[in-house]
Image (spheres, rainbow, N blue to C red):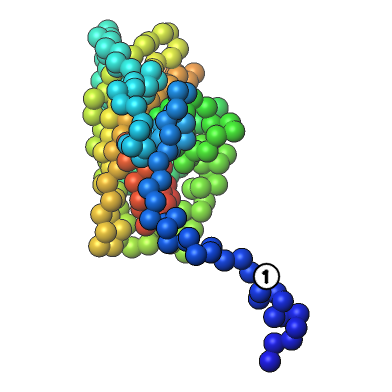
Amino acid sequence: MANAKDSGAARAIPTAGPDFEHLLAQDVVIEAGGSAPTGAQRVAPDHSPRARTGIVDSAADALPKPGLVVAGDVQREVEQFLYRQAELLDGKHWQAFIDLFAADGVYWMPVTREQTEWEGSPSIFAEDKLMMEIRKGRVSHPNAWSQAPMWETNHLVSHVAIESETATTLEVRSRFHLMELRRDTVRHFGGSYRHSLVRDGAGALKIRLQRVDLFNGQAPFDYVLQVWV
């Protein structure tokens, strides 16, 4: 039998009251107001029945810059560099992939296309070479679940455009599609790459910043990404 103290605690638990079903039956409307949309409404305006339509995000929806027609074989050199990166990922050559980055290189996958920085903001990936080495050690462990048998990826890279070129740097954009097989499950990821490339002392291309924007990053998935896309 419960003592008096237990009985008092049970009676202290609040209830929703007789109007609970009535409250559940009400429609919840998010007021758009006169200010710019924020939070989920900004990411997916159709979440609000009163959200404004036709809003163009200047950063995410700006007209792409025309690709440069560069002299010599720079276009092909950049394309072959990106194709090489994709092959290294699909072959699970993690160290060779990391070696494509400059000493101060960063791999960044923001949560939304609107993000302009990773300090103080959530990101799916935000890794310098040290953090990439740590991830490599984890996925290379013999007991790494993410590397279980029947796990493979296949990258396709296209629409490679050089937006700007100087004697030391190149700004490049491209598109990608990734198919991932894990046992009997196939997942697809797609989006865009933005590479800031520099040349090392020998003239070889290195990555100073790789930004990866997933167009389906907000979709529900059974498990999180384990390695770079």
Q: How many marks?
A: 1
Name the secondary structure under disc 1.
loop
Q: Is 76 or 214 nearer to us in this picture?
A: 214
Residue 111 coordinates in the image, percent (x, y) = 44, 37
The amino acid type of the residue labelled 1 equals: Ala
User: Which residue occupies 23% across, 29% down?
Assistant: 158
Q: Dot 1: few (<14), some (14–19), or many (≥20) neighbours within 10 Å?
A: few
**In this view of the protein, can residue 176 be seen by the observer?**
yes
Q: Is residue 167 above or below residue 189?
A: above
Rendering quarter of residue 87? top left
User: Which residue occupies 41% across, 45% down?
Assistant: 28
Residue 119 coordinates in the image, percent (x, y) = 58, 31
Q: Which residue is mark 1?
A: 12
User: Which residue occupies 27% across, 7% down?
Assistant: 71
Q: Is 56 or 30 nearer to us in this picture?
A: 30
- Which quarter of the image is occupied by the C terminus? top left
